[in-house]
Each structure stands twice: as structure tokens, then as C-alpha cells.
Amino acid sequence: MKNILAMLLIAVLAFLTITYVMDNNIIPEYGEARLDQTVSGAYVTQSVTEKNNDVSFGRSDNLETGSANAVTSIVLEYRAFDTLGEVTVLFIAALGVSLLLSSSEGFAKRSKSGFILKVGSKIILPIVIIVGVYIITHGHLSPGGGFQGGAMIAGALLLMAISDPEFIPSIKQFKLLEGLSGTLFIILGLVGISVSGYFLNNYMDTGIIGTLTSAGIIPILYMFIGLKVGSELISIITDFLREEAECD
């Protein structure tokens, strides 16, 4: 019965999507799009400083995004709303896993880990957490950011679960942290609307490019994203540990 309902729902969504696309005058016919009028074209041809001056690392200030990482400038400035959608997709995935495995109770009795795994995990664990935090806080300066750092912190918890059979994650605290970080992310976006009229607009001082306190609200957004992503992945890991207990 569930499979039939799922197929019907997919068919209805597919019909509505195709109907909207076919009848939507906003989407031009193939080959008739004006590339010079697209949003991406406007940003590609725009100067970062709105002038033709060179950007000097560690000296130039009051830049448009203030981020030394070009990828970060795109995903948390020009496409910040899209990034919010990506975080929402991860939340839906975690929620789906939680609903599917909601019948599992307790945790599996895991086998004792070997000597190398026990000792090695104690050495690697703090390094993984520190690097994860570093990647989150320096995402506007170097490759990385909230998604990557949050995944590393969640991986540290998985390492703890593998190496220590007595370790039991406290999922309630992580769910609370996930909800709080997501709420604060939305609040920052709404403040942007009230200040400048745009959701998640970078309304804070962007500082001097290359410094830790530069890029305005971007480092703050990355912190919230890192907490949210890490909490959601930890929730998924914990649910699968419960499923392992159910299978045993």
C-alpha cells in the first residue's frame, strides 16, 4: 500500500512540474535565452570592489564580500538562499532516517575494539575535532567551511562509537543544537531583509580581506552551518547504531 501511495505521489508531482514548466512564460525556449541578462552574467562582469583597483590580500578593506575564498563568496553571498536549501535537504534526509528507524530502541552490544584502534583513536580524535573547527572558522579564508567541518566533527563521533563499545551518543542534545543553529541561520537572513531588503544580505562590515574577522556575517553563517550539519549527521549515525541493535 505504501509503495502504491508513493508512486501516485511521484506521478502527481511529475505532472504538476511538467505542466508548470510547459506553461511558464518565464522560462524561455531553448536557444532563445539572453545570456547577457542573466544574474550570473551580471556578477561575472562586475568588479569585486566596484572599481578597477587591484585587491591586495591583508590590505584591501570594505570589499563586496570580504571573503578571500571565491567559493565561499558564491555559496554564502550570491547564492546564500540556495545554500539554505541544501541544508534543508540534509535535514529532510536526517528526518527520513529517523522516521524509518524510529522503531529501534537501545543500542547494539558492540564487540571490543583492538589495541591499535583504541590507542589510535585517542590520538586521532582530538586532531579531527580541532581540524574540523579550524575548517569551519576559516572557511572564508581558505578551502572548507561549515559543511566540511561539520562532517569532520560527525566523523569524530563515529570514530568514538567504533573504538569504544561503551560510548552512547546523547542524541537529544544534538537535536536541540541542530534546531537552534538552524533557527539562528534563519534569523540572520531575516535581519538582512530588515536592514537592506535582501535575505541573508551581508550587512556587517566586511573588514580587511585575509583576516579572521573579515567577510561580515559569512563566518557566523558558517559556524551555524557547521553546527547544523554536524548535528544532523550525528543524528543519522545514532539512528543507524539503533538499527544495528534491532538487527542483532
Image (spheres, helix red, strand yellow):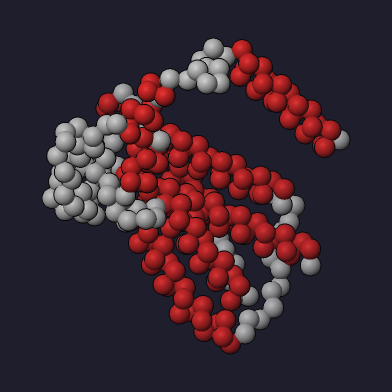
Nearest the eye: 77 or 116: 77
Q: Quadrant of residue 134?
A: bottom left
User: Where is residue 95 drawn, in percent x and y?
Assistant: 62, 45
- From what the image shows, is residue 76 above or below residue 247? above
Residue in the image at 43% along x and 48% along y = 225
Eyeballing the image, is 222 above or below 134? above
Name the foreground residue: 26 vs 11: 26
Image coordinates for residue 85, horizontal then vertical, percent: 50, 37
- Classify 178 as above or below 3: below
Q: Is residue 15 visible?
A: yes
Q: Is residue 34 left or right of residue 246?
A: left
At 13% from the left edge and 50% from the top edge, which residue is drawn? 59
Residue 128 at x, y percent in the picture: 44, 69
At 16% from the left and 43% from the top, the residue drawn is 54
- Classify the position of the C terminus by image quarter: bottom right
Q: Farthest residue to the right: give it.
A: 1
**Which sits in the foreground, 105 or 90?**
90
In this rendering, position of residue 84 left or right of residue 103: left
**x and y percentages locating residue 9 in the rendered image:** 75, 28
Which residue shows up at 31% across the image and 49% down it?
Answer: 69
Say whether residue 177 is visible.
no
Q: Give the vertical position of 117 relative to 94 (above or below).
A: below
